Image (cartoon, rainbow, N blue to C red):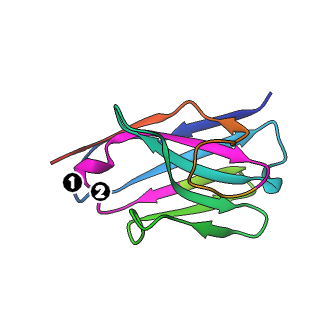
Amino acid sequence: DVQLQASGGGLVQAGGSLRLSCAASGFTFDAYAIGWFRQAPGKERRGVSCIRVADGSTYVPDSVKGRFTTSSDNAKNTVYLQMNSLKPEDTAVYYCAASRTRCTYNAFGWNYWGQGTQVTVSS
């Protein structure tokens, strides 16, 4: 069975850091792109990072550039999202997803989704 297990969320003060993990199983990890998305109440789900596991190329949107980075440990089939200088507006449920085709910040078309982990940033 395909599984994407997101973990590492929690409550942090503004300016703090968190590292999320996405452990993948059940598919050929290095044939996929792994993205992180977030969704706040009443808002659409949008991408905040993506990594093409095969070559390690990473992408982050301007909205989080300089604060969020993504990386992978291929031996562990795990992708990380390092979030620094967190702001209250980063509060959301964070999801990881896998795509067989490409990196995109649009949530449409991803093949597999994890269950989400809550990140709450207090001011």
Q: Amino acid at mark 2?
A: Leu
Kindly check if marks 1 and 2 are in contact, taking CB atoms under 8 A apart as contact.
Answer: yes
Q: Residues within 10 Å of mark 1 (few under 14, many from 20)?
A: some
Q: Can residue 10 be seen by looking at this rendering?
A: no
Q: Is residue 13 magenta?
A: no
Residue labelled with disc 2: 86
In the image, residue 89 lies at what x, y percent?
27, 49
Front residue of 19/68: it is 68
User: Quadrant of the rendered structure where residue 75 is?
Assistant: bottom right
Residue labelled with disc 1: 14
Q: Residue furthest left?
A: 123
Quarter of the image for the N terminus: give it.
Answer: top right
Magenta-tinted stretch = 81-101
Q: CA distance from mark 1 to mark 2?
A: 5 Å
From the viewer's perspective, is 4 left or right of 20? right
Up/down of 14 relative to 109, above or below: below
From the viewer's perspective, is 63 left or right of 52? left
Q: Is residue 99 magenta?
A: yes
From the viewer's perspective, is 102 left or right of 13? right
